[in-house]
Image (cartoon, rainbow, N blue to C red):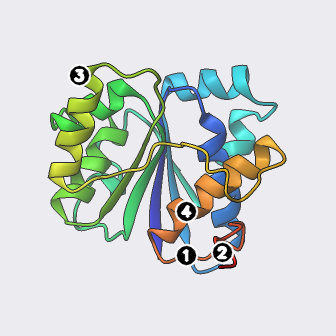
Amino acid sequence: MRLIVGISGASGVIYGIRLLEVLRELSEVETHLILSGNSKLNISIETDWSVKDVEALANSVHRFADVSASVASGSFRTDGMIVAPCSMKTLSAITNSYTDNLLTRAADVVLKEAKKLVLLPRESPMHVGHCRLMYQAAQMGAIIAPPVPAFYNRPKTVEDIINHTVGRVLDLFDLDSDIVNRWTGNGN
């Protein structure tokens, strides 16, 4: 399996980082990473990771401005793409087919090739324009998966919350990461 991971400039870059960590442990998955400029800034603001160490988690790293990279073409076969987190700017560009960078171009290609595009929009509260963009992206075939925590799994740490979201996103690609505390019913 070959997946593209985009990390845009919204708060919540830890979702993309954790996704890469988990995917690295799955030998059947080849990852292609695209980092926006603002994501690199947020990595330094929000985490103890360096950009270099985040890039080392991926099998291949593509420059944000390189719209001639392999992942910019439908002839480069992938199983889909995850944008975690997905800024409203990136969501707007994807929804409007504005492909002036590799992240939005790769997302556009994934949609046109009818592959899975999973977007983790990270904004709250949302105004009607944000909601409209998510609706339009879903109409185009994107899967909208905001990183909203679940509590039936009784998370004890922030890592538990992040793992649950990342694991549920990977479920969309039939990848069992073994990091989800799954619902088994209420015992009735």
Q: Which comes sooner in the sequence, label 4 or label 3?
A: 3
Circle 1 crowding by C-alpha within 10 Å: few under 14, some 14–19, many from 20: some
- Residue 1 appearing in the image: yes
Residue denoted by label 1: 175
Foreground mark, 2 or 1, reads 1
State the image coordinates of residue 119 (x, y, percent, origin top left). Answer: 39, 46
Discs 2, 3 touching: Cβ within 8 Å: no
Question: Which of the 4 image quarters holds residue 88?
Answer: top left
The tally of labels here is 4
Q: Mark 3 belongs to which amino acid? A: Gly
Instruction: Using the numbered discs, state the Cα–Cα distance from disc 4 to disc 2 in whole angstroms.
Output: 15 Å
Label drawn at residue 129: 3
Secondary structure under tag 4 reads helix
Circle 3 crowding by C-alpha within 10 Å: few under 14, some 14–19, many from 20: few
Secondary structure under tag 2 reads loop
| Residue found 71% across the figure and 59% down from its top | 153
Q: Which comes sooner in the sequence, label 2 or label 3?
A: 2
Q: Which comes sooner in the sequence, label 2 or label 1?
A: 2
Discs 2, 1 touching: Cβ within 8 Å: yes
Secondary structure under tag 1 reads loop
Secondary structure under tag 3 reads helix
Circle 2 crowding by C-alpha within 10 Å: few under 14, some 14–19, many from 20: some
State the image coordinates of residue 95 (x, y, percent, origin top left). Answer: 20, 37
Question: Which of the 4 image quarters holds residue 179?
Answer: bottom right
Foreground mark, 1 or 4, reads 4
| Residue found 20% across the figure and 31% down from its top | 132
State the image coordinates of residue 40 (x, y, percent, origin top left). Answer: 60, 27
Residue denoted by label 4: 168
Q: Mark 1 belongs to which amino acid? A: Leu
The C terminus sits in image quarter: bottom right
Q: Mark 2 belongs to which amino acid? A: Leu
Task: Name above or below for residue 115 compared with residue 86.
Answer: below
